[in-house]
Image (tube, grey):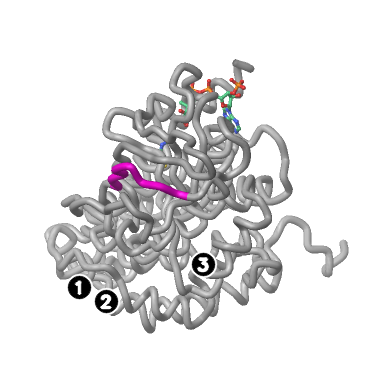
Amino acid sequence: MNPDFDLYQLSEEHEYLRQSVRELCEDKIEPHAADVDENSRFPQEARDELTKAGFQAVHIPEQYDGAGADSIAACIVIEEVARVCMSSSLIPAVNKLGSMPIILSGSEELKQKVLPSIASGESMISYGLSEREAGSDAAAMKTRAVRDGDTYVLNGTKAWITNSGHSDWYTVMASTDPEKRANGISAFVVHKDDEGFEVGAKEKKMGIKGSPTCELHFTNCVIPADRMIGEEDTGFKTALKTLDHTRPTIGIQAVGVAQGALDVAVSYIKDRKQFRSAISDFQGVQWMVADMAMKIEAARQMCYIAAARAERGEPNLGFISSAAKCLASDTAMEVTTNAVQLLGGAGYTRDFPVERMMRDAKITQIYEGTNQIQRVVMARSILGR
Ligand code: COS
């Protein structure tokens, strides 16, 4: 056996990165997590600290002034931030989601225009696909983009857009040829100062309360034609290809919050005494934490594999990226619910973070495609449809 053989393990750099991000999260982000949730306020401290340390968008390639970190490194950052504050983890996660369409399909000029400001942390970028009547059926979108000389004019409304109002840039999918449905959709980059663009009211949500979710309104919004990402009518494919790369990041975010809840529960059950012994001495409790840890680890490995396969540019990523997101988010919901159970009455109060984690975990089963849609994608891949 060769002890130097790195068979199926993360690199030392990845582990070193995890340690650095964890320290920063515990020192600078976790102390604000409860207040961010309680007051539904943007985690500005997290944005500042992540930016200072260069962790707000590690995936931006070096040629656009980024760190050029691989997809597993990007996962580790999101996982560790989510372990202490889900709302804050949406800063690196949505920076990746919003910029992947440009990285995958944008022109060199567009990349040069947008990506360096994300890399430096000066700007954030959001992703606008969903509409009120086009959620799971994303191709049913009504937002229109009509060519007018060397501009496009956008009209319509996008819904549930994460980090809206705090982002400077928005990747927006709009129909350029409604007859062609999915194959008549184009992707654009919109700037917050573009004429005719407006961010709507903030949604009142169950969880991830620190991450603003708003509508985007386009009223004769004029943008230069060179802000289109790739060719006309290719935007839906770019949007789905993007999700192949980013669903593993939602999976790992779910792993992070689940791990955070397990860590709180483990420390609590070792301390909590009932029937004259720590409740961690009871086998029923031990089996609960064993199951929680087992499922978290399975989900974590699947997310890293999905992320690595996306990074390698493998084809047919639909199955693995949907499976990773689905397994991890179902795990997070189960684990955070059980963490509340292990803390009993205390877990149901805001004296402990597990009730927040349980509320925050729920969204991972919904956004970037509901877990029902993930199963559609998996089934299509298995059945070859
Ligand atoms: N990458 C690139 N292209 C893809 C793709 C992928 N992963 N998956 C499908 N496509 C292509 C298809 O090949 C098809 O192109 P052709 O007509 O040239 O063959 C086109 O995209 C449309 O695909 P399809 O017909 O499968 O589209 P549907 O309308 O049936 O939708 C689902 C497919 C349901 C999978 C898609 O709408 C979806 O993922 N919905 C959920 C959206 C979502 O995640 N929303 C959350 C918003 S982000 S927070």
Query: Looking at the picture, which amino acid does disc 3 mark?
Result: Ile
Q: In terms of secondary structure, where does tag 2 sit?
A: helix
Could you say which disc has been placed on residue 118 in the image?
3
* Neighbour tally class for label 3: few under 14, some 14-19, many 20 plus, Cα within 10 Å: many
Which of the pair 353/74 is nearer the observer? 74
Query: Between marks 1 and 2, how big is the CA–CA gap?
Result: 5 Å
Q: Which residue is mark 1?
A: 35
Query: Looking at the picture, which amino acid does disc 2 mark?
Result: His
**Magenta segment range?**
216-223
Query: Looking at the picture, which amino acid does disc 1 mark?
Result: Asp
Q: Is residue 63 visible?
A: yes
Asked if labels 2 and 3 touch by Cβ distance under 8 angstroms, the answer is: no
Q: Residue at x 42, y 67 (%)?
A: 81
Asked if labels 2 and 1 touch by Cβ distance under 8 angstroms, the answer is: yes
Up the image or down, 90 lies above or below 139; here it is below
Indicate which label's residue lies in the foreground, 3 or 2. Answer: 3
Q: Main secondary structure of the magenta part?
A: strand
Could you say which disc has been placed on residue 32 in the image?
2
Q: Quadrant of the C terminus?
A: top right
Q: Residue at x 72, y 40 (%)?
A: 314
Q: Is residue 205 visible?
A: no
Which of the pair 108/273 is nearer the observer? 108
Quadrant in the picture for residue 158: top left
Q: In the figure, is residue 348 to the left or right of 198? A: left
* Coordinates of residue 174 in the picture (x, y in percent): 43, 35
Which of the pair 205/288 is nearer the observer? 205
Q: In the figure, is residue 9 to the left or right of 52? A: right
Indicate which label's residue lies in the foreground, 1 or 3. Answer: 3
Q: Residue at x 73, y 55 (%)?
A: 8
Q: Quadrant of the N terminus?
A: bottom right
